[in-house]
Image: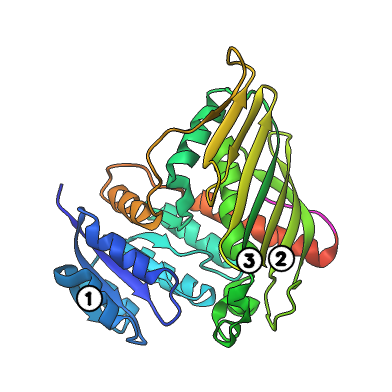
């Protein structure tokens, strides 16, 4: 199958850019990469990482799309800057992989999903954890009926408070809700919300809870969220999302059903274990699959293959939008003191 040209549309502060460039470098289906960065800040790293794959470095996103006609665009920008660039890429007939959250309001992302559908292009947020082997295995276990009817879930993803103490971080777009759409919940918590829906095959339809700044740093976006969730299969869940540690992560997804449970711990301990009363005798089992790969290279590879028509997208525009709507419903619930429907 012929390889494709991919446009990387970025600017100062583009998240995970080095990981995306590294992924494109080793992805066999990529013949050439065009990097467009108005600031010029990424030129050196792009040339060093991509080598001969770098077809051109530009400073104008729209011109790069027009001149090189890529089949796929990878957009990593401040959230507030992203929607018009994603729109330009879709209008140029690109499939789009967009670094989350890609908007500061779900209302700004929704018309992009409509446009992508109209043009039969993929639009996927970079919720890369879907491709982890343990996540795929857990999804298969749940959908095979191994733990029975889903009763509920508990989610937590806790990262370090240390990064929040840096004056550089205080000035970054991640610390300013007007530029980022939110704090920990929209940056990290969204991954776990998406995984809960992905693994169970059910959507979050209502949310309530609290957000705030518990660590005392001069931020304009939350460092902590605690939520209660209702799913369309009738089950309930809870979510803790915060910057609390000195370093590293504490993370956990546990899903209970009528015949047992599944537990993921991607950042320590046993990555995946489960218990089912359908086994004889019932016992705790552990995932014996290969060690997990870094998540961004597999995501880039999967999106390139989807752009080539070789496999479905990792997640659809509609799924991306629902994850965003869930986060913004959580924010509205915290602000109003009333639970919010996710529609």
- What residue appears at the point 58 percent right and 59 percent down from the top-left corner? 249
Categorize mark 2 by other alpha carbons within 10 Å: few (<14), some (14-19), many (20+).
many
Whether 133 is drawn above or below 174: the answer is: above
Mark sitting earlier along the chain (1/3): 1
User: Do callouts 2 and 3 mark residues in contact (Cβ within 8 Å)?
Assistant: yes
Q: Position of residue 322 (x, y in %)?
A: 59, 52
Where is residue 104, by image quadrant? bottom right
Q: Is residue 96 left or right of residue 49?
A: right
Whether 207 is drawn above or below 98: the answer is: above
- What residue appears at the point 64 percent right and 62 percent down from the top-left corner? 185
Q: Is residue 100 magenta?
A: no
Q: Which residue is mark 1?
A: 48
Mark sitting earlier along the chain (2/3): 3
**Residue 201 in sight here:** no
Seen from the viewer's position, the closer of residues 339 and 27 is 27
Q: Which residues are magenta?
A: 338-343
Q: Is residue 341 magenta?
A: yes
Categorize mark 3 by other alpha carbons within 10 Å: few (<14), some (14-19), many (20+).
many
Q: Position of residue 6 (x, y in %)?
A: 26, 64
Secondary element type, mark 1: helix
Our reading of the magenta stretch's main secondary structure is loop
Q: Position of residue 67 (x, y in %)?
A: 21, 75
Where is residue 3, by image quadrant? bottom left
- Separation of marks 1 and 3 at Cα, in angstroms: 32 Å
Seen from the viewer's position, the closer of residues 63 and 288 is 288
Q: Which residue is mark 3?
A: 184
- Separation of marks 2 and 3 at Cα, in angstroms: 7 Å
Mark sitting earlier along the chain (2/1): 1
**Residue 152 in sight here:** yes
Secondary element type, mark 3: helix
Q: Which residue is mark 2?
A: 224
């Amino acid at each position: 199958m012929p390889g494709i040209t991919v446009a990387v549309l970025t600017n100062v502060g583009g998240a995970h850019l080095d990981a995306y460039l590294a992924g494109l470098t080793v992805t066999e289906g990529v013949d050439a990469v065009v990097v467009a960065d108005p600031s010029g800040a990424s030129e050196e790293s792009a040339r060093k990482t991509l080598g001969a794959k770098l077809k051109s470095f530009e400073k104008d996103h729209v011109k790069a799309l027009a001149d090189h006609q890529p089949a796929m665009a990878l957009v990593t920008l401040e959230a507030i800057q992203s929607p018009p660039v994603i729109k330009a890429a879709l209008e140029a007939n690109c499939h789009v992989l967009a670094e989350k959250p890609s908007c500061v309001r779900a209302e700004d992302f929704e018309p992009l999903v409509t446009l992508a559908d109209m043009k039969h292009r993929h639009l996927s947020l970079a919720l890369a954890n879907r491709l982890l082997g343990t996540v795929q295995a857990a999804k298969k276990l749940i959908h095979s009926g191994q733990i029975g009817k889903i009763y509920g879930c508990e989610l937590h993803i806790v990262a370090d408070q240390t990064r929040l103490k840096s004056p550089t971080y205080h000035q970054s777009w991640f610390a300013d809700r007007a530029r980022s759409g939110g704090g920990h919940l929209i940056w990290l918590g969204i991954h776990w919300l998406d995984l809960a829906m992905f693994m169970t095959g059910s959507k979050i339809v209502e949310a309530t809870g609290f957000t705030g700044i518990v660590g005392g740093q001069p931020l304009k976006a939350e460092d902590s969220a605690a939520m209660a969730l209702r799913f369309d299969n009738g089950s309930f869940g809870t979510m803790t999302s915060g910057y609390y540690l000195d370093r590293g992560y504490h993370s956990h997804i546990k899903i209970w059903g009528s015949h047992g449970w599944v537990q993921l711990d991607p950042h320590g301990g046993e990555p995946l274990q489960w218990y089912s009363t359908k086994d004889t005798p019932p016992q705790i089992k552990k995932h014996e699959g290969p060690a997990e790969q870094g998540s961004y290279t597999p995501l880039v590879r999967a999106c390139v293959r989807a752009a080539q028509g070789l496999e479905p997208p990792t997640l659809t525009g509609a799924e991306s939008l629902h994850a965003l709507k869930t986060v913004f419903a959580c924010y509205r619930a915290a602000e109003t003191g009333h639970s919010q429907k996710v529609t």
